[in-house]
Amino acid sequence: MKNNVYKIFRLFFTSLIIISMSGSFVSCLEDNVNEYAGTEDDMSKDGLFIGGHFNAMLKDVIPTSDVDANEYQRAQNLTGDIFSGYMAHIGTWNSSSHNGTYNLYFDKWNDVGFTNGYNKIMGPYIKILAKTDDKVYLSMVTIVKVMGMHRLADNHGPIPYTKFGAGGLTTPYDSQEVVYKKFLEELKEATKELSDFVDANTKGDKPLVKYDMIYAGDAQKWLKLGNTLRLRLAMRLSYIEPALAKQHAEEAANQKYGLLTDIPDIAQLKSYGGNVVYNPLETVWNSYADTRMGASMDSYLNGYKDPRLAAYFQPTSDGAYHGVRNGLSINDKAPYEKMSTPNVLKSTPVLWMTAAEAYFLLAEGASRNWNMGGTAKDFYELGIRASFTQHSVSGVDAYIINSTDKPIRFQDMVGSSGIAASSTITIAWQESASFETKLERIITQKWIAMFPEGQEAWSEFRRTGYPRIFPVVSNRSNGQINTTTQIRRIVFPQEEYNKNREEVDKAIGLLGGSDTGGTKLWWDAK
């Protein structure tokens, strides 16, 4: 049974926001973030006001509801998880015309992530900002805000950000360029404040320890997360503003307290202090039976004879691991329910960022001749080792030197169709290889290591073109999305068109193309 504090937290956020008949959808969210159940007196006791809102933000960087998995499914599983090639949908919704087949206009699925970002990330952030000027608290909260909101920007492109909270009937959007540069500056300042705190923290104080479901108040780990997140977002700019990317990447990589390069530093949401976390992916694959292993994961992991296969997926009745192509048009999902499911239980923590990702970011930076403090080869191999250690899997020494195994042809075990492997990349590092081959090798192993965090995997696929993943079988975008190029973004929410049309029209101008899934984001510039 959840404790009383947790029950209070739930009361704050379980009521639905009532959208008025006029004005901006986002502005209405701003107006309603004040309407929580707890009184000011109740919420000020024992740091509950700040801690409660901080705790709520943590639970919705990736939507993690203890009630059901619908928000997670729509905001994560039916976007990044399938667009990255990690998983495949097997649902038959709307006669197989939905996100999985590139119809982005079905049932307002793509409103959910947007609503979540402003209701459950930005709303609580604004409340905390108005309540305290404690630099340590604000630094931790800022890192969470950026962790959540960069996912939103990576879905849509332009978003309301710098002017959110100012009030008014409409809320202007910022270009993705403005938003990303603001992210980087916010992270630079937050990590500086945390570094100063850690330097002076001789008593071992643990800020927000009662409410911190990630690091239990360990400010040094929050500092490492902030540095690593800054490196992640800096790398995102590698093709659009390489000089700025290099500047922020080198600064982040060479900070005094470093990055998330130790396994215990992994950022993941887990049950803590009376707050119980149920991983919603378990509900999606098990209770809903709507998702299975993706065909691309089948091709790469089986081709490499990857020892992490059993850590990532559950075998089928024949003891093997079989995936599913995305974009199937099917009337009956029952045959596909027999394919491999994610090896995720209700108790499995919800992953944000791994030590392996930190090493692969360093490897890419080093391969670009940026000062990352080491060589691309060493960081690449450390990334693989970190992933094996994270999943308690043996055989890493043989895996790292494997220079022969490649991704294999995918065979549909239900139907008769198959498709040739999309890549011939091997595992072992080759110093004499071209930059592009090195990049494919780094990103392919990074993609494997980040599983099951499909949002970031999809973003890296769009940024680099790697790994090479299978296209959808059926494309129902009416020509808006190129099957070969694959989906590049999520359209703006219908509610924003209904309530904030003038600003959405301006945002489309900032986007630089039509509001479709085929228009590239600002940083998608390779």
Image (tube, rainbow, N blue to C red):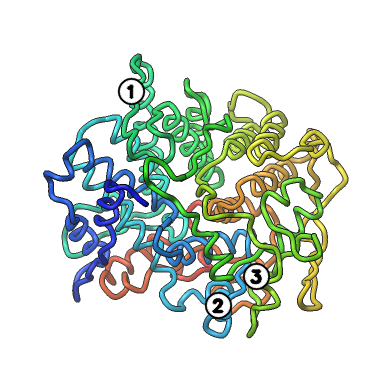
* Label 1 Cα crowd, 10 Å radius (few <14 / some 14-19 / many 20+): few
Instruction: Identify which amino acid the numbered label 3 is placed on.
Output: Asn
Residue at which label 2 appears: 477
Residue at which label 1 appears: 205
Label 2 vs label 1, nearer the camera: 1
Residue 262 % position (x, y): 57, 29
Observer-nearest residue: 153 or 264?
264
Q: Earlier in the sequence, mark 2 or mark 3?
A: 3
* Label 3 Cα crowd, 10 Å radius (few <14 / some 14-19 / many 20+): many
Residue 141 % position (x, y): 33, 40
Instruction: Identify which amino acid the numbered label 2 is placed on.
Output: Ser
Observer-nearest residue: 423 or 521?
423
Task: Give yes or no for contact between labels 1 and 3 (Cβ–Cβ under 8 Å).
Answer: no
From the viewer's perspective, tell me whether residue 102 is left or right of residue 74.
right
Query: What residue lies at 56% left-to-right and 46% top-to-bottom?
Result: 239
Residue at which label 3 appears: 326
Residue lying at the far front in this picture: please name it: 1
Query: What residue lies at 19% left-to-right and 72% top-to-bottom?
Result: 20
Cα distance in 3D space between marks 2 and 1:
53 Å
Residue 403 % position (x, y): 85, 41
Query: What residue lies at 27% left-to-right and 69% top-to-bottom?
Result: 500
